[in-house]
Amino acid sequence: MPTLDPGLRSLREVVCAANLELHRQGLVLYTFGNASGIDRERGLVAIKPSGIDYQELTPDRLVIVDLQNRVVEGSMRPSSDTRTHTALYRAWTDIGGVAHTHSIQATAWCQAGRELPCLGTTHADHCHGPVPCTVPPSAAEIEAEYEEATGQQILNAFIGRDHRSVPMVLVARHGPFTWGASPAQAVYHAVVLERLALLATVTRTIDPSVDALPAAILDKHYFRKHGPSATYGQHS
Amino acid sequence: MPTLDPGLRSLREVVCAANLELHRQGLVLYTFGNASGIDRERGLVAIKPSGIDYQELTPDRLVIVDLQNRVVEGSMRPSSDTRTHTALYRAWTDIGGVAHTHSIQATAWCQAGRELPCLGTTHADHCHGPVPCTVPPSAAEIEAEYEEATGQQILNAFIGRDHRSVPMVLVARHGPFTWGASPAQAVYHAVVLERLALLATVTRTIDPSVDALPAAILDKHYFRKHGPSATYGQHS
Amino acid sequence: MPTLDPGLRSLREVVCAANLELHRQGLVLYTFGNASGIDRERGLVAIKPSGIDYQELTPDRLVIVDLQNRVVEGSMRPSSDTRTHTALYRAWTDIGGVAHTHSIQATAWCQAGRELPCLGTTHADHCHGPVPCTVPPSAAEIEAEYEEATGQQILNAFIGRDHRSVPMVLVARHGPFTWGASPAQAVYHAVVLERLALLATVTRTIDPSVDALPAAILDKHYFRKHGPSATYGQHS
Amino acid sequence: MPTLDPGLRSLREVVCAANLELHRQGLVLYTFGNASGIDRERGLVAIKPSGIDYQELTPDRLVIVDLQNRVVEGSMRPSSDTRTHTALYRAWTDIGGVAHTHSIQATAWCQAGRELPCLGTTHADHCHGPVPCTVPPSAAEIEAEYEEATGQQILNAFIGRDHRSVPMVLVARHGPFTWGASPAQAVYHAVVLERLALLATVTRTIDPSVDALPAAILDKHYFRKHGPSATYGQHS
């Protein structure tokens, strides 16, 4: 095995920890799902290898790719979703991590092809509005560059929407992608999304006619936690 | 760090234990939720700091505030829901603890903006009637004093209703608050409410037309456990 | 503390183990639920004390009552459901144990006031037909002898039905009771009932129009496991 | 106890491990469910004994039967579903293991008598199309050779369908059967099926009108993981 670049050690460690956290939080079954992180200075991404069990995952086993999806380091094939991750890193230069799961409730909303409505303050505390659902790929897109096309559909869903105030998306018929300043935050958003989706499913079971939270409460809760006027937490 | 008042030590300990119990019972995800307790002689409340992980919580880290929400002891910012807690302590002088969660089933009923009907004896053993849901705040209330207004909406929901015989409330679009003679009892009621809400969700899934328990059974079960004629438990 | 009758030691032990198993299987929250067992030769029943945490339960703490509900041994008050247990022991002289829970799915069917239909072979493997639901008590019954009346309603639900081939019942608006040759078997039936109720809830969610299993399959499965022609297990 | 054939030791070990994995994954309650494996050279099948707790299962306790269901080795009675397993082994000579469970979501779809539609890519990653549901047995079949008939109904459901690209079936009113190249893969498919069924139940709860995944996406995902053009995992 060739010597690994020591400059990528800490990236490998945070990305490995993020992948293991996905597993610990119960968001992934077997090898479904993956998390990645980027070293912005070098333009390199560390990502889970394709089809590897979480139990066997170590920092050294991660694959390093560049933003054109070329493997730079690692003997294994990278996740089959790699092109979707890199499409997001190229478009949104302020994100540091991406996570993808097939978590139950979020995936069910994807399968239903529905955006996740903001039905309460738990949602408003984390997302400034509904979580969009992508438009399904055309037959031509599926044929040509499917994983690349998935990235493009996500970016399309954020035209006119800020990816920082809604750090998550539902890919139609597939599963959710989430992102954040770091791989750990991307995973945090994956866990939060699963909870928001569960709350929405149960709420609509109790009353199918519940509609979106009024904008005034949405703003109050979102900006209590985010932005210059935030009063939540110990960060000010 | 300044020396902590030894007279508040036991209050800090019971409130810390109550917060950890919320976490152990699976009612809170990450930093969502909080529990508080009051020293009635001194008029001081111990509450969880805002945005702190339950794993890092110790008695010394709790914040002490007075009933006008002034921080008396502690270097961290108190929970963003503090004004709701103190509004309840000011109005109801016989309660010793308050808990707030975003637990799944109770929060879904809040999001649906529905009172939780009393559908069976499990409910009647703990609450003498439905758990009310608050009226959502007006735009003016949201702007001015949102957390204070939440407290006021809870008190409004108990006009003509005894807060001792229904020790819990659903805050519309937000989540539940519960209370009791002590912080531990407030948490007990949070756990019970989550179970009652789950039972109601499943019951209505089986048959959407089920209506409230007849008053005679409600009274029988409630007064078997509560008040001068109680025969349940070993307390008489 | 007075010396306990050594002749009741093994009854105390099996009943204590049955109560702890209810807790271990996740069927009870806090002090909800109870299991009992009978020594048929002496006509004495061991049952959980009222309102005691499962963590504090030991064989010595169980209460011994006779079939007229008189406390024979024990310093604590017996479960508030004791009169329901003894009504079953008096009527059905071949049962050795009774269990009562507020387990989620079974209780939801009780709250809906519906019998649990036999929708598949998992049900048919354990019960020869639907699990009946009692008729709710009249106002007069609630006033007079509520727990005794619950026992009578259960017995009424089994007029023309064999309590051995359907060892479980849904008490309307309340929760399930189950029984068996021993306290352990009563608890086994409580666990099985919770699973059958869950399967029925999900099945009806998928398709509300699913009706009962045809009689030929019901008979095939039930008699494969029960009675003289049984071929299941290693018991023949 | 007679000496066991050492040539069957490794078959016994993989089948025992597969049965224990069914239990560890939460797919079986008490003794419900079973897994088997075949030694194709010798035409012998190892299967779980009927009605035995998973805690007591050891490789030595498995029963060895031939493809005509004759017990070749073992003092216990084989699983009551043995004839269904052997019917599959006789018809599909490329499978090495079979599993049967009463797992909650898959069983609910069986009880509803519905095929499991392919609603998303999680399903398409594992099955090339819907999971079929068998036609219920006739009264005559139930009387005569019930377990044999179950095998025949499964085979009928695969007329015109490839059992390798859909390695699972829903037996109407009963529960799922799954298979694979090995007992471990059969169990893997049982776990995957339970997840696919759960995703479908929640998806249809959110929107009852969701229909099957378009064929282009189904093909893309299925063939990304299976067959000569697969790019998933590290197997190429």
Image: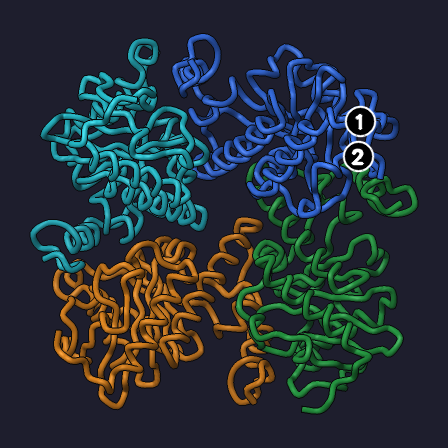
Chain colours: A blue, B cyan, C orange, D green
Q: Are marks 2 and 1 in contact (CB under 8 Å)?
A: yes
Above or below: residue D145 compared with residue B165: below
Local packing at callout 1 (Cα closer than 10 Å; few below 14, some 14-19, many 20+) is many
Front in this rendered view, residue A123 or D218: A123
Amino acid type, callout 2: Pro
Tell me what residue is drawn at x 55 percent, y 81 percent.
C223
Chain ID of residue with mark 1? A
The chain that hosts pointer 2 is: A
Label 2 sits on residue: A78
User: Does residue B208 appear in this view?
Assistant: no
> With D224 as the anchor, is D154 left or right in this view?
left
Which residue is disc 1 drawn over? A65
Between C181 and A101, the one lying in front of the other is A101
Between marks 2 and 1, how big is the CA–CA gap?
Answer: 8 Å
D172 on left or right of B194: right
Q: As displayed, is residue A72 above or below residue D183?
A: above
The residue at the point 87 percent across, 42 percent down is D230
Q: Residue at 34% x, 26% y: name it.
A: B49
At 18% from the left and 28% from the top, the residue drawn is: B89
Are marks 2 and 1 in one subunit? yes
Residue A144 higher or lower than D106, as above or below: above
Query: Which numbered disc, 2 or 1, marks the residue that appears first in the sequence?
Result: 1
The answer to whether residue C205 of the structure is visible from this angle is yes
